[in-house]
């Protein structure tokens, strides 16, 4: 049975508290599925009803330590706008702020440095259409060339231009980024993008000739995913299953 979430503090709106609980859940799930990079990289969420304010992880905490109340509220430049005792990492927010500022649909953004994701980001062709999971991303991935550690605010416009209208951005020689209108959609996209990268790394490591999927089948399966597969109800069911997992292994995420 799903455990009831801790009530919102009197100084926090119900909508913000729900966003905090969902974002804390994303961090705990990312830790569980080994998507983390110690204390680095970020998952961020726009604060509902507050223009230009976002929630981000408290810099220095491991992702399995993050709770709804420990998340830090920041502005578009990465400056704290609440009285949190925890620091934020403004430099790390460059990538997120670029997309949050421009795209209203990208209310949720997740960036990872996983082994498989970074490995695929170093390949000229990026993610290959070699298996069913990868095919759901056909024509849904953008690529951005590596420019160094994301400290240059001038890169923000180029990041947004690279992403375009796709939900996935492969940062070449760097890692993966997914966006979504909700925590569920963002996390679902990252979960399967990461799985596709893991399968590709395993496939290429075998050193055997590759069996390509014919182009017409690639297009067909991609359209199938756009139609009957991956609907909002399916994503909601997956998200509910993720939250039940957390209620069993880390129920304090919504504290």
Image: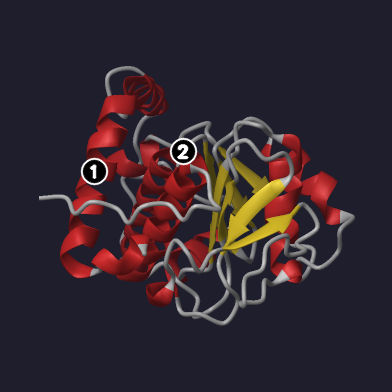
In this view of the protein, can residue 204 be seen by the observer?
no
- Check disc 2: other Cα within 10 Å, few if <14, some if 14-19, many if 20+: some
In this view of the protein, can residue 167 be seen by the observer?
yes
- Of callouts 2 and 1, the N-terminal one: 2
Query: Residue at (27%, 26%) from the top-left corner?
Result: 233
Query: Residue at (31%, 35%) from the top-left corner?
Result: 235
What is the residue that sits farthest to the right in this orientation?
154
Determine whether 114 is above or below 25 in the image: below
* In-front residue for pair 189/13: 13
Question: Which element carries disc 2, helix, strand or loop?
Answer: loop
Question: Which element carries disc 1, helix, strand or loop?
Answer: helix
Image quadrant assignment for residue 122: bottom right
Determine whether 91 is above or below 239 in the image: below
* Circle number at residue 182: 2
* Circle number at residue 123: none
- Check disc 1: other Cα within 10 Å, few if <14, some if 14-19, many if 20+: some
Image quadrant assignment for residue 124: bottom right
Q: Which residue matches tag 1?
A: 240
Q: Which quadrant holds the C terminus?
A: bottom left
Query: Residue at (41%, 23%) from the top-left corner?
Result: 219
Query: Residue at (53%, 68%) from the top-left corner?
Result: 113
């Amino acid at each position: 049975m799903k455990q009831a979430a801790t009530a919102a503090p009197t100084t926090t709106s119900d909508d913000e508290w729900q966003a905090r609980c969902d974002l804390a859940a994303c961090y705990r799930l990312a830790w569980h599925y080994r998507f983390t990079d110690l204390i680095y990289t970020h998952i961020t969420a726009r604060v509902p009803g507050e223009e230009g304010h976002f929630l981000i992880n408290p810099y220095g905490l491991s992702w399995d330590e993050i709770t709804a109340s420990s998340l830090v509220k920041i502005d578009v430049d990465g400056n704290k706008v609440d009285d949190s005792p925890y620091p934020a990492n403004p430099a790390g927010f460059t990538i997120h702020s670029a997309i949050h500022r421009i795209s209203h649909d990208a209310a949720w953004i997740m960036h990872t440095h996983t082994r498989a994701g970074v490995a695929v980001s170093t390949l000229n062709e990026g993610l290959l259409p070699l298996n069913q999971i990868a095919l759901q991303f056909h024509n849904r991935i953008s690529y951005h060339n590596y420019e160094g550690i994301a400290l240059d605010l001038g890169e923000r416009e180029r990041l947004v231009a690279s992403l375009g209208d796709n939900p996935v951005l492969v940062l070449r020689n760097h890692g993966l980024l997914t966006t979504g209108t909700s925590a569920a959609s963002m996390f679902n996209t990252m979960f399967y993008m990461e799985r596709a990268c893991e399968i590709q790394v395993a496939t290429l490591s075998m050193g055997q000739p590759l069996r390509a999927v014919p182009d017409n089948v690639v297009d067909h399966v991609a359209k199938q995913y756009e139609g009957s597969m991956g609907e909002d109800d399916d994503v909601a069911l997956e998200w509910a299953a993720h939250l039940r997992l957390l209620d069993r292994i880390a129920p304090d995420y919504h504290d």
